[in-house]
Amino acid sequence: MASSPPYTYIQCPCSNEEPAEGSDASSPESDSFHDAERTFDPRAPRSNYSLYPLEYLLYCEECQQIRCPRCVDEEIVTYYCPNCLFEVASSNLRSDGNRCTRNCYQCPICSGPVQVGEVQAEPETNLLSADNATAAPHGPYALFCQYCSWVSSEIGLEFERASGIPSQLAKMKNGGIPRITAKELKERRKEDPDMPPLEDELVDAELQYSALRSFYQSQINGPSNGLPGGLSLGDGHNFSSPAALTRMMSMWQPGGRGAQGKTAGPPDVFPEATDTDKGLKLAQLDESAKVQKLLNGGWNETVSKDQLLGQLEHAHFQDELRPLQCVLRTKRSRRCAVCRHIISKPENKVASTRFKIKLVAKSYIPSISIRPLEPRAPPVPVGMRPQQPQEPPLKPLQPYQYILTFKNPLFEKLKVTLATPNNTPGRFSSKVALLCPQFDIDPVKDMWEDALDGDDRSRTEETGQAEAGKIYKRGRNWVSIILEVIPPLLSVDSLRPHTASGEPTDRSPLREDEKILEIPMFVRMEWEPEAQHDVGDRVGKDRNEGQKRELAYWCVLGVGQISHE
Amino acid sequence: MSSSAGFAAAHRSVASIRSGPSQGPSTPSRSISSTFGSPSTIRADDDIIVIELGSRLLRVGFAGDPVPKATLQCGPDEQRRVGDFRAWLDPTKTPGQAWSSEYELWRYDLSKVELGLVHDKLDRLMREAFSKFLLIDSKPRRMALVADPSLPLPLLSTVLDTAFGRFQAPMVSLLSPATMSAVAAGVRSALVIDIGWSETVVTSVYEYREVKTTRSVRAGKYFNNELYRKVLHPLIAEDQGKEANTVSEKSHGQENPTKEKMDRDRAVDVENEKDHRLSFDESEDIMRRLAWCRPTNRTSQRTSAQLETVEEQDENEAEAGSTTTPGADRTAHVPLQSSTPPKTIDVPFERIADVCGDVFFEPSMNLAHFDDHELPIHLLAYRHLAELPVDVRAICMSRVIFIGGCSNILGLKQRVIDETTSIIETKGWEPASGKAVDQLSNNSKLKWKPTKTPHLEQDRDEEDGLFSEQANDFDQFERGFMRPRKKDPPVQGHIRALHSVGPWTGASLACQLKIPAMATIDRELWLQQGVNGASRPNDVDVKAQQRQSMGAGGLIRGSGGQHTNWTLGKWGAI
């Protein structure tokens, strides 16, 4: 599934613990039994959510368990802007809407970063003023995209000052039309109480929202800060029953409401919003102008899906797009969800990429690498070395042999037991054989120590060729074994009409992922903590005597592409 | 009351009592903290996370924000393994079998939905929203879920499991999108027309209660499939077939209804087609970007459609638009990447409008040809209104709210309103129609006349008695609230469309104002009892529950929480 095989994915054990289906939690015992028996199918749609490359996994030392991003609790260390790398205090977050307020904007067209620049009025004047550039008055500023050369003046956004773009932008609609904020409206109304309500076209979502909010709030808080309309105690959004209504009535005795009560009698349910100031907005049904715009402008005038998803409000045409304020990012520390121990904690400083604590799984479980026994790809030239050699696709129904190398990161001897199904799950199943499913890997040791130890044992055991039950090659802290596969014929017509359980076979055409040969493999490792050679620590040794630790998990080996011609 | 998101106001009444008697001029009652409150309280007073669950997307944000912080979709690229960067390495998508089902979060037909997968998808989307856009850690937070009340129970249960399990929300309230849209439009009653992806749902909300819901499959998915089948597929295939395709397609308007019917069934096959000519992404993009809808031919009705605003529109332009829209014969050059070979096709705008009209209105067909699940939108709205009690109808018809992704199709809202108005004007609210009715009304011997007045003011006196039984529920209520408003009668009796900021915003507003939801589920109770522990809405002492939940932001629950009843409200109705 990754871009190109070979690769290894590891399934986090947490995905087996949760109930498979929300509804059938009736028989947990039989379920877990089933789980243990069942072969993991890497192509099942749910597997995509539980498989991780080894680099993404953490390890909890207390629980002795692999931890994936789904089974850790996160705590935020710092908030920062990815563009200007400024740290943002958490108290400003809410008012800034989780976005950077330091002129960090993204292009609405291509999402590249934009820069504030001066709009050059006329090329001629520029030439003239080249001698004394400082003397020239600074013209309006705009946002320039460095990637797609989009300029915000295209949509009429020009700024008086180069700093404080967010506050300037907040007061401006596309096309340079001033945007009325709720605060402004309030002030205007204060100055001129008889001002007619705004026209509906000028009311945007934010303004309508704040109008609605203040309207509802004034209703809820009653007449103390009520509107000039003298709305009576407008509580009770909804009285759910007549009984509740009477209860409310008895609560609000007419006398209790004092001098302010303008109307006597039972309290009213508050009325609906009746004008723009209260948040009512009629729908703009007449869209003929927009239709004309669409017909004239065609495809390129409209907004693509990716552009739209970045926007906060709905936009249909390119010139309705707003520059995007950069969303802040966070540095997070991670805790094991079970035992609450911290398993990863980055340094506070934004620019630092170091971690105070980081228990990565790579230093606790063996890494697995795959390479063909007889590589068919030409070696990569030295100049292009980091590149992986691309193996040609595997021919169906031909045996291939691969070298699996396990590398032990621990200071203890590791006993590894492997298991694979003989036939991989799925519609097209390949035949798999592990020639040596059980072996020991020596611990990480000093090179010197290794040399002193003598390597009589390893020499006798390894064969250097594919032989059943024997290790292919052994090194200081690694072991290679041979994996044999026979890829299937990828043709829907060759499938048997019925599966073993009698259901008709899925005859839908070949899916993208079925072309890749993936093998589920169950890895079980066993080790004794505090290895024997640690002579100094006798007490520790006694304590851990005979205490074996084990860890078991499924992993997926992506072996290669199968040719399907 | 069987309402879903009916709010009751226990806590607010308490607040008012407190301030009520001692109300001097100097003691203003405590107002609810605004967004821009003191910074020290930020994130400390627990934010409620509002989640709107659509069949295609998830909107997530904090209560109190006017717009959601994140809108996330769930396509195949979002479903890949962690560390699989194929989507970025090779952005050109190959078309194949993958069609809409891969892009949906869930669908109503549960036989084709793997609940575990829905759980995984939701989990990933919410995690992404929380960590990338909301910037919050894994502290438990209260959630408000805006979801269709007809969400199947197993699915709802999965969603709640996700919220309670992985995200450890102490409480989840369920809110209905229709009611929330009404809140976000500032009205108490509304006719909410939700033209979404899988269905068009018409819901009448009366006094924040959902009265009736009707549905039709004429929505985004259907439109997309039709557009692909009738326009895009022939255009791409044109290399071989040349003009032949277009000609045959052009004539389809005159085809007889039964053939058309079969035609429609074929649209379903688009879903299962083995080899699509272009990727779903691009097909959907074309639909979203280029779709437009012709105005109705009957411009005369326009004035009654919109009394307030449209009066001042340019009459000439409207007249011109009614017959032919200038420029409609143009084509759009659409560059395709997923077709083999990649090429640019010229999509005629006229054809798009044809398909759009056919999908949503189907003007060429008789009423009798529609099944119950596939009524055109205007008919759906009309029938819905006609079946409502007269009071409810009067109020709702002048509060029409459009929500849903496909309501953004240019010109669609206008057309729905126009068509609905024209049906009302020609037919009135007479449920029966057809030849016999015409004969009866033409028969001069019988002095019988169908009530042809759409305006309520005249209707009311005659029909009140008739409907009193159905309207009884509302009457009691209404009497209480109509009385003091005599001078300012509510707008009613004519079609009027309102703009709503949207269900998400409505929910955000409701949560910020701390309006308790009818269906509020406590984590402990859910984990103990699961979906089977829910009682019927009527058995729940809402007041008691709310009184309890008010303590310390609802985080610390009373110890008596164990034996309170809780309900899923309308979501739990079987």
Image (spheres, coloured by chain):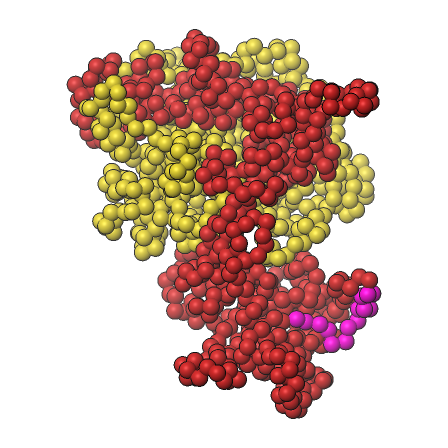
Chain colours: A red, B yellow
Q: Quadrant of residue A563?
A: bottom right
Residue B453, visible in the rendered structure: no
Residue A416 forms part of the magenta stretch: no
Q: Quadrant of residue A294?
A: top right
Taking the spot 45% from the left edge, 27% from the top edge, the residue there is: A209
Drawn side of residue A183 relative to residue A132, left or right: left
Nearest the viewer among A486 and A412 is: A412
Nearest the viewer among A552 and B526 is: A552
Q: Main secondary structure of the magenta part?
A: loop
Drawn side of residue B421 relative to residue B29, left or right: right
Nearest the viewer among A103 and B379 is: A103
Q: Residue A354 at what x, y percent from top left? A: 57, 57
Drawn side of residue A225 relative to residue B251, left or right: left
Taking the spot 53% from the left edge, 84% from the top edge, the residue there is: A533
Q: Residue A207 at what x, y percent from top left? A: 48, 24
In magenta, the rendered stretch is A369-382
Residue B15, visible in the rendered structure: yes
Nearest the viewer among A3 and A158 is: A158
Taking the spot 79% from the left edge, 71% from the top edge, the residue there is: A376
Taking the spot 44% from the left edge, 11% from the top edge, the residue there is: A191
Height in image: A405 above or below B107? Answer: below
